[in-house]
Structure formats: structure tokens, C-alpha cells
Image: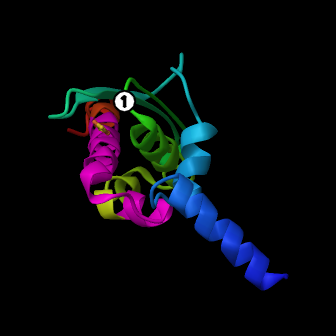
Amino acid sequence: MGEGFEKVVEELERDLVGGISPTVVDHALNPRNVGSMEDADGFAQFTGPCGDTMEIWIKVRDGEIVRASFWTDGCGTTVASGSMVTELVKGKMVLDAMEITKEDVLSALGGLPEESEHCALLAATTLKLAIADYLRRKGSL
Ligand code: FES
């Protein structure tokens, strides 16, 4: 058993969720950082071409993103993408966070099926817009 058994379980899980990584399943079922933020320093709402909307709030201290949260009306992979992008951004300096791409979200999630990759793009784009809002409020844009 041991390793062999774990492999079988892994394969079963993969079949059950149609090739979606365990990280995606985890973030879709237990999303981190959900909900609006009262005292946010930056906010954006963006609707992708598929019609799904994401909102992202960020809290910045001394140029560092100390908190981020999100909301979406999208499907499970969109929820997972919002959850992951708000985790990735925590502790990053604003200008470094601006560099986070769809590929970064995808790689942190262990990939998404091709037809769902745009969910990661929605998350990365909304984050960029929230950072742009922060910079605008600060008078840097
Ligand atoms: Fe529309 Fe995921 S299905 S963003």
C-alpha cells in the first residue's frame, strides 16, 4: 500500500473533478479572503467577456499590501482564482504585486483546464485595477 494507495486516491480524485488540481478544489471549496473590506485603500470591480464579475479590495501599509479580499459571482474556478490571487498578493510591495499575471495565478493553482484559464485572467486583471485605484487615490497615477 503506502505510495501506491496514495497514487490511486490521487487518480480517483483527479477523475472525479475532471482533471482539476487538488489546489483548485481546495481554493474553490474553502476560498480564502472572501468579502468586502471596509477600510480598503484600493478597490476594483471588473466584468470579463464571459459575463462574470470579480471585485478586489486591497489594504496597503508603507507600500506593502498587507491584506486583500475578493468577491465574485463566477464559477468554482473563478472563486479559486480570486482566492489564490488574494493570497499571492499578501506581503508584496505594490509595484511587485502589479506584475502578477494570469500565468502566476495558473501556476500557483497547479493549472486550470484550458476553457477555464480566463478565470485566472479575470483575477489578475481585477487585481491590477485595484492597485491602479490605490495609486490613483494616492495621487501617483
Ligand atoms: Fe467566467 Fe470563470 S467562467 S471568469
* Residue at 51% from the left image edge and 20% from the top image edge: 36
* Residue at 35% from the left image edge and 41% from the top image edge: 127
Q: Is residue 118 magenta?
A: yes
Residue beneath disc 1: 74
Where is ligand 1, by quadrant? top left
| Side (left or right) of 21 relative to 129 | right
* Residue at 47% from the left image edge and 57% from the top image edge: 20
Three-letter residue code for mark 1: Gly
**Which quarter of the image is occupied by the N terminus?**
bottom right
- Across and down, in percent, residue 87 comes to 55, 49
Q: Is residue 86 magenta?
A: no
Q: Nearer the viewer, residue 73 or 105?
A: 73
Q: Is residue 128 above or below residue 69?
A: below
Check mark 1 vs ligand 1: CB closer than 8 Å? yes or no: yes
Q: Residue 5 appears in which quarter of the rendering?
A: bottom right
| Side (left or right) of 1 relative to 31 | right
Q: Write the start and end of the magenta stretch as one range.
A: 104-132
- Secondary element at tag 1: loop
Q: How is the image coloured?
A: rainbow
- Circle 1 packing at 10 Å, graded few (<14), some (14-19), many (20+), is some
Residue 2 seen: yes
Name the magenta segment's main secondary structure: helix
